[in-house]
Amino acid sequence: MTNNSESKPWMDASKSDRQRAEELVSAMTLEEKIAQLHGGMKTINIYNVDMSAMQDLSDEEYDEMMTQLRVERHVEGIDSLGIPRMRVTNGPVGVGMGDGYPSPKATALPMTIGLAASFDRDLAYRYGDIIGAETAAYGQHVLEGPAVNIHRTPIGGRNFEYLSEDPFLSGVMGVEVTKAIQDHDVIAMGKHFVLNDQEDERFRHNVTVDEDVMREIYLLPFEMLVKDGDIASIMSSYNRIRGVYGTEYHYTLTDILRNEWGFEGYVQSDFWSTRSAASAINAGLDLEMPDAKWLNEDNIKSALQDTSLEEKTIDRALIRRFTQMFRFNQFGKEYDPQEVDAQAHGQVAREIGGQGAVLLKNDDQKLPLQADNLDNILIIGQEKFAEKACVGGGGSSKVDPLYTVAPKAGMEDVLAELGAQSRVEAFIVADDLSNLDQAQEKIAQADQVIIMAGIIASEGFDLEKPELPNQQNQMISQILAQDSEAVVVLKDSTPMLLPWHEEAKSILEVWNQGTEDGHVVADLVFGRVNPSGKVPTTYAAHEEDLMYYNHPERHPGVEEGAGYPEIKYTEGHQVGYRWFESQGIKPLYAFGHGLSYTEFDLDAIQVQKASDNTVTVSFNITNQGDRDGAQVVQVYAGIPGDNQPPKRLIGFEKIALEAGQNKTVELSISADDTHHPFSVWDTGKGDFVIAQGDITIQVGIASDQILAEEKINFD
């Protein structure tokens, strides 16, 4: 034992993390304990900030506003006790607003909706590996991510940083990101717990949801983070849940999270989501961020005096956090920020971006383009999508990129690497389309027109409707009317309505790409990368097909006399593809849909159930084309029950095949898996139970492209 550990026994690394935390807390004064319950920022009134105003700001105005909101994201250290300044950075799409201003530049990864579209576990780990490595390099201790709330509607303002409409897919990808981040001795933080699936009035609205729906859909990815990812921290949400703020809801923060799931980490508030002192700590909140608006010395001492709070409860909160800090070796580590390898990390971002892109439509095999046949290529679209790299994602998660590759420059790079002599020109359409007619001559002269369009959504507000802003639908239709061979490249934060769909021969969804935008798009359209992404959230054909249409109680909420909006999840389990199938509505592009530049054949599909309640799905898959590619085979279960959806995703596998290659693949799905693949929530028993009756196992390549099915029974 060193001299340091003799005077500070909690610095003895031979002891367990929990023991060290307990010894540290026992040595602290009450004032020191209180100082560790909250962040170190000077308190401001965030509730006066009009987040919805961000949608009308220019890039420069937006950056100025976010500069004002950039904060020192930390908990002050106590040198005499060896407690380090705990530095917190935002995620989940890269290292965002870290502790200290200015925040460090980092790799702007593709938005996590694009990561989910990859359906690739290994890629999700590599995504988290970049984030974890850069967080550690910059001397930060905590990365606020992954975010696993559900795309309940396509207009959700934070869909870009959430993953998908499916809880299992979101959970699987979130778990891999978590593991990778924490492999760098960085605390990962799952957010936003729970039911923060919409941004409008997020500081006020109340969510009402049936217990079985909450368990089977909205809590499920968080359960996977805890049980499969061993995540170290959870961030509570802004919204009320059944009339109680998420930061004060004992049922979710303690009964479910800790007592049922066995979570041993700590709970941090979302920034400025804390609404009380004693009630929040008693419910299970352990850390207020970013300031001491509530968990300050006056409030805490007053609560201790009137016995609404006990000091042992304060100790509990601190022990939870310090245990995780010891777990990840964050005590005694020097603050020594390092540079990151921007180019190496950028190459990984480029690969991730290509694997997450979804080829929605490709009539006449228009894509990939043959560069040798093209002398003049015209990129056309509005500035954010056709001139600049689409870094995407407004709000606290926005990354200040180390570098970016613009569309024109990236395309020129790829063409040069292919040995093509093509000339690339860009025409930037004004946001009001005032100069669109001037593009007619350039369109006529081009051998190939590539339209780039999209949307960059933001934290703080939901979209009014899933519609491309600034009249981009009109722009696309007008261009396609002149040139029906134009390729449409979408750079979206969330699936949009595509009213010009029939007019386009080829549509490629690349999402908000980030750092390597220009290279990724060119890799895809010229066939250097074969798209293999799948739709993670359904594209509706019409707005009236969506679950919330003409149902204001579902979104944006209704006033019922309580003084705040009530949002009611009256659709039950029928969210996303479950909604479309249960209502018999044909989507424009179904969940799991995605084309390729090659063709795949699946045969010899078999489904077998073993005595240990494991279901095995096996099949042969062949790449019948002349290009290497990858296919995602999806397994769904149709669970019997009046309230159950027609199907739920319970398994998937992404299989990479060389041209002409054949593989035999086997997937095993156990009834004991964390995502409860064959079970439903039994409110009476307070637990998941295997569904009674015939369960239909469906195997396919999209939710609406089922190739085989088999009934099984666990009775």
Image (spheres, helix red, strand yellow):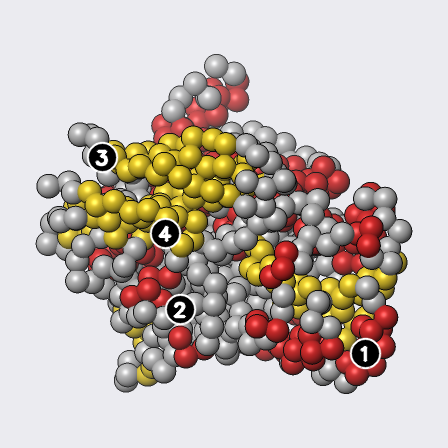
Q: Amino acid at mark 4?
A: Ile
Amino acid found under the numbered disc labelled 3: Lys
Q: Which mark is residue 200?
A: none
Q: Residues within 10 Å of mark 1 (few under 14, many from 20)?
A: some
Question: Which residue is at 61% across, 73% downward?
Answer: 503
Q: Are marks 3 and 4 in contact (CB under 8 Å)?
A: no
What distance separates the C-alpha of mark 1 from that of mark 3? 61 Å
Task: Return the residue at label 2.
Answer: 586
Residue 330, position as x, y percentages in the image = 53, 33
Q: Earlier in the sequence, mark 4 or mark 2?
A: 2
SS at mark 1 in the image: helix
Mark 2 or 3, nearer chain start = 2
Mark 1 or 4: the one toward you: 4
The span from disc 4 to disc 2 (Cα, nearest Å) is 15 Å
Q: Is residue 405 left or right of residue 603?
A: right
Residue where numbered disc 3 is placed: 609
- Quarter holding residue 647: bottom left
Answer left or right for 140 relative to 554. right
Q: Is residue 172 left or right of residue 644?
A: right
Q: Which mark is residue 440?
A: 1
Q: CA distance from mark 1 to mark 2?
A: 36 Å
Quadrant hosting residue 343: top right
- The residue labelled by disc 4 is 706
